[in-house]
Image (cartoon, grey):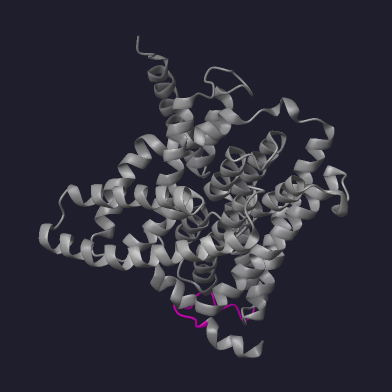
Amino acid sequence: MLEVDFFLDLAIILLSTKILGLLTKQIKIPQVVGALIAGLILGPAVLNIVHETDFIDKMAELGVIALMFTAGLETDIKEMKKCGKASLVIAIIGVALPLAGGFLVTSIFSGTALGEMTQQQILQNIFIGVVLTATSVSITVETLREMGKLKSPSGTAILGAAVIDDILGIIILTIISSFADPSVSVTSILIRIVLFFVFAGVCGITFYFVFSHLSNRHGKKRRIPVYGLAFCLILSFVAEKFFGIADITGAYLAGIIISSVTQSNYISEKFEVLSFMLLSPIFFASIGIKTHFSALTGPIILFTLALLIVSVVTKVVGCGLGARACGYTKKESLRIGIGMVSRGEVALIVADKGAAIGIMNGVLFGPLVIVVIITTLITPILLKISYKHKGDGDSDDQDYFEPESCLSEL
């Protein structure tokens, strides 16, 4: 007989994530936080109503693919070019410091000297740093849009750097995931990564011309989004199956490729319905359902606090220093650093992937979820405070700023 319990689980997840999402939205907190809290309440941490099942795991994996595909579709290549080298400098420093900070904190709390660590322990410590490199641009963008600062110099820099941040994080995740297999050499890992990006480039060029032809011939037909989704799933499958690359990398690249075709907005619009109604809520709820706070002993609580402090300080300092090096004012640099603090859905995706492939100890999953929730909550508040008072030489009211011209000072 067909097992039908998953119908009830699915209904409970969808209703609870939406209701709590609406409640958090009312108090100016991103809906993703409400979805996470819903999963925590439903799962073993609180009510123990919904449990982790194979169905939820599979749907959550599709939710990850959907989120990364959507992130790729929303990547504005022109906006990235506008910020150019300045955003790249900000992103690189904003990735390096959290990566080092996460590794250092986890190493200290593990109580094992670097020379005595196993490969698994080293990978886990690096992986915690990889999670901290992520930036949730959607939360910052919504806050900046509300304040009318999205097109300010600092707003533009945050947008460009956050996109590059996520690309760098995914590349590092791919490398770390590959290292998890002890039978694979470093050289083969790098070769596979290069070959995959070459393959993706060839697919991208081919798909662009084929898709442009189909778009011009058929216009806004419902089959077009289906082709786009199929391309995303195929590239995700090929990445994982034949190149050993994380499937989310394939999904993200598929989104970037499709973002340049004429029907990209139409595809995004149709695909968003599937993601919003079904896949994304299940993914965010599944994160909460997987989280167990029973392991939050005294040392783990201290580790969580240390990780939270490091996650905030390294982003503010790292991105702020990168901005100052590119000629932004002190106040603009501070705003850029604060705008990059929120970890959001990207960090959750990375953490979930690490847990799935066995890199990360399950005990550390709870602290990471807490860090994601708190950084997501405080970023809009800190941003609004940083924009409240303007100082001398503050150029955030300008409509256009060319940070590349400041790089000559480096």
The percent position of residue 190, horizontal first and vertical second, equals: 58, 63
Q: Please state, as top left, top right, bottom left or bottom right, where the N terminus lies in the image.
A: top left
The percent position of residue 271, horizontal first and vertical second, equals: 31, 46
120 or 62: nearer the viewer: 120
Residue at 65% across / 54% down in the picture?
130
Residue 405 location, quadrant? bottom right
Apparent side of residue 370 relative to residue 150 in the rendered image (left or right): right
In the rendered view, tell whether residue 402 sits above or below residue 237: below
Q: Is residue 264 visible?
A: yes
The percent position of residue 147, horizontal first and vertical second, equals: 49, 60
Residue at 28% across / 62% down in the picture?
207
Q: Main secondary structure of the magenta part?
A: loop
Question: Which residue reaches farthest left?
Answer: 217
**For the image shown, how many numbered marks are present on the structure?**
0
Q: Does the magenta portion include 389?
A: yes
21 or 159: nearer the viewer: 159
Q: Is residue 390 visible?
A: no
Question: Which residue reaches farthest top?
Answer: 1
In the rendered view, tell whether residue 171 sits above or below residue 32: below
124 or 245: nearer the viewer: 245
393 or 202: nearer the viewer: 202
* Magenta residues, start to end: 388-402
Apparent side of residue 185 relative to residue 83 in the rendered image (left or right): right
Residue at 52% across / 32% down in the picture?
286
Q: Please state, as top left, top right, bottom left or bottom right, where the C terminus lies in the image.
A: bottom right
Apparent side of residue 264 relative to residue 107 in the rendered image (left or right): left
In the rendered view, tell whether residue 108 sits above or below residue 158: above
In the rendered view, tell whether residue 379 sits above or below residue 31: below
Residue at 59% across / 64% down in the picture?
387
Q: Does the magenta portion include 352?
A: no
The percent position of residue 352, horizontal first and vertical second, equals: 57, 41
